[in-house]
Image (tube, rainbow, N blue to C red):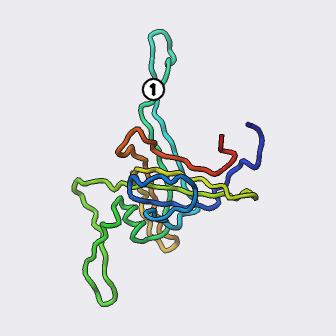
Amino acid sequence: MAGFKNTEIRIAGAGVVWTAPAGTAVPKETTALASPWVNLGFTSSDGVKFNKKDKNDPVDTWQSMAPARFMLSDRDLTVKFQLLQMNKDTFPFYLGLPSTSIATTGSTTESTAQKIELSGAPGGQDQRALAIDFADNNGTKDLRYRLVMPYGAVSEVEELSMTRTGAVKLGITFTALSGDDPSKPLATWLVNDPAALA
């Protein structure tokens, strides 16, 4: 029921970004994720930004200067975030490559050197599943929200700034894809919040 209720204000006080192979089954609850889901670690204090952008084409008629209706012609679902950890899961993900793209270059006296090559040749796109969790304790219970995109890819990255005055940030825009079955949802929200339930 609509009205002023401060108990329905949500604060995403703590969250986690997860990735898994494309098409990984969407969990049915908001409990902690397990393998094959991988926790991508710390993100910047800006958190995660979710955006739904629809393109509506007007249907014009001879009889009116205003459109008679709109036809939905395009939908983009994106999430943006900045990863703060550099490792075998985060850096290839930022580059739009699978973790298997890390190769050994040979050993040195101290360690084994690794390399990641960025090709200019046409090739496949690294598709993943992505999940975003956040929780808000409103004083009575942990209210959990989870956004899951079963198929998607890194569609844009921020420039990589390397300075002595701040952490390296891997800024990523991840866009949902239709996957193998266009009839399935692009994304699913899972919640255990009584205020959000019918």
Depicted 56 relative to depicted 102: above or below: above
Image quarter where the N terminus lies is: top right
Residue positioned 53% across, 56% down in the render: 132
The x, y position of residue 110, in whole percent, is 34, 89
Q: Is residue 166 above or below residue 54?
A: below
Q: Position of residue 117 (x, y in %)?
A: 27, 66
The answer to whether residue 96 is left or right of residue 40 is left
Q: Residue furthest left?
A: 121
Quarter of the figure that contains the C terminus: top right
Q: Quadrant of residue 195?
A: top right
Horizontally, is 193 left or right of 174 in the view?
Answer: right
Q: Who's the residue at 37% across and 42% down the image? A: 181
Of the residues shown, which amino acid type is indicated by label 1?
Met
- Which residue is farthest top? 63
Q: Which residue is mark 1?
A: 71
Q: Residue at x 31, y 67 (%)?
A: 100
Q: Nearer the viewer, residue 67 or 103?
A: 103
| Residue 87: quadrant of the picture | bottom left
Number of disc labels: 1
Among all residues in the image, which is located at the extreme front? Answer: 28
Residue 170, how many percent across, how many down? 45, 63
Q: Residue at point 53% right, 64% down?
A: 43
Along the line of sight, which residue is nearer the eye, 100 or 30?
30
Expressed as whole percent of the image width and height from the top left, the position of residue 134 reads: 60, 57
The answer to whether residue 5 is left or right of residue 41 is right
Q: How crowded is the residue under tag 1: few (<14 C-alpha within 10 Å), some, or many (20+)?
A: few
Q: Dot 1: what SS? A: strand
